[in-house]
Amino acid sequence: MQDKLSGKNIIVTGASSGIGEMLVKQIAANGGIPIMLARSIDKLRQLQKQLKEAYQIDSHYYKVDLTNDHEVDEVIHRILDDHQHIHGLVNNAGSGVFNFVKETSVEEVQLMFQLNVLAVIRVTKLILPHLIEKGEGHIVNIASQAGKIATPKSAVYASTKHAIIGFTNALRQEVANHNIQVTTVNLGPVRTNFFSHADPEGNYRKNVEAYMLDPIQVATKITSHLFTNKREINMPWWMEFGSKLYQLFPSMMEKILKKQFNKK
């Protein structure tokens, strides 16, 4: 994997914590050059220092609020000006609120769609002409198993991830002749600070703690498939198996797994 990533510039959104932080560390460990995007400039600066000390890799960081269209446009154009060749893009940043539809505010709905869907499409659109011009690249979009199986209290979040799965599947076909790989990553619950916002009372986290994914394991898996022709990464495997059964027998699965579906 070292040769595959060596010297390649890879943009990672939401790089300052959680899966994003683990991803940039794995990329740097394998010789890649992370280009880190997040809102917290202090965390990015500290992470850059850690990467240099641990892996002797020069990384780059840019402060951006992905819900601000003007900032996104400005930062992506600056990245393209600063770097002759961008090889990869990992759209990792995202947020969620677990609540019933009737109790979810319009502002929360708008924020989830802005960050989880519109920002992903916007960043991708801005980077895509560059990748096509270079004749190579890899776009990785972090979706969710929730995009395949929607459950109570995740209606809005699940719909954003369902949108990303659809967007990614269509994009993959559109760029097939340009030597650009496109991968969807569908994850179950991951042990990150995502839940401090999505589930502030901690009930869901407590219910699923036993089978939460390790962010290091997730990042390692994603990194191992960078610049390969991998359609989907699905974790954990048993949740993906359940999603396939759900597609075939939705009513039956909703009845059988009613207790599991109502753990939020």
Image (cartoon, rainbow, N blue to C red):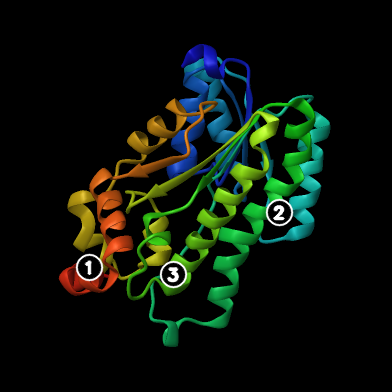
Q: Which residue reaches farthest front?
A: 248
Residue 206 image offset from top left, x and y in percent: 21, 61
**First in residue order: circle 3 vs circle 1:** 3
Tell me the element at label 1. Answer: helix
**Viewer-proximal residue among 232 and 261:** 232
Residue at mark 3 to residue at mark 1: CA–CA distance: 24 Å
The residue depicted at 51 percent of the width and 26 percent of the height is 228
Please name whichever residue, 214 or 238, is drawn nearer the observer in this view of the structure. 238
Q: CA distance from mark 2 to mark 1?
A: 36 Å
Query: In the rendered image of this protein, does residue 172 appear above or below residue 144?
Result: above
Please state which of the two labelled residues, at mark 2 or mark 3, is closer to the viewer. Answer: 2
In this figure, which residue is indicated by the disc labeled 2? Answer: 122
Image location of residue 162, percent across then percent down: 48, 61
Q: What residue is shown at x 22% (from left), y 68% (from top)?
A: 253
Q: In this view of the protein, can residue 66 be seen by the observer? A: no
Which residue is painted at 70% across and 29% down in the image?
Answer: 86
Residue 168 visible in the displayed image: yes
158 lies above or below 4: below
Q: Residue at x 32, y 49 (%)?
A: 191
Q: Pick whichever of labels 2 and 1 is earlier in the sequence.
A: 2
**On the rendered structure, is 213 left or right of 220?**
left
Amino acid type shown at disc 3: Val
Label 3: element kind: loop
Which residue type carries mark 2? Arg
Q: CA distance from mark 2 to mark 3?
A: 22 Å
In the rendered structure, which amino acid carries the disc numbered 1? Met
SS at circle 2: helix
**Residue 253, label in figure:** 1
Tell me if label 2 and label 1 are in contact, CB under 8 Å: no
Q: Are marks 2 and 3 in contact (CB under 8 Å)?
A: no
Q: Local crowd at mark 3 within 10 Å, few (<14), some, or many (≥20)?
A: many
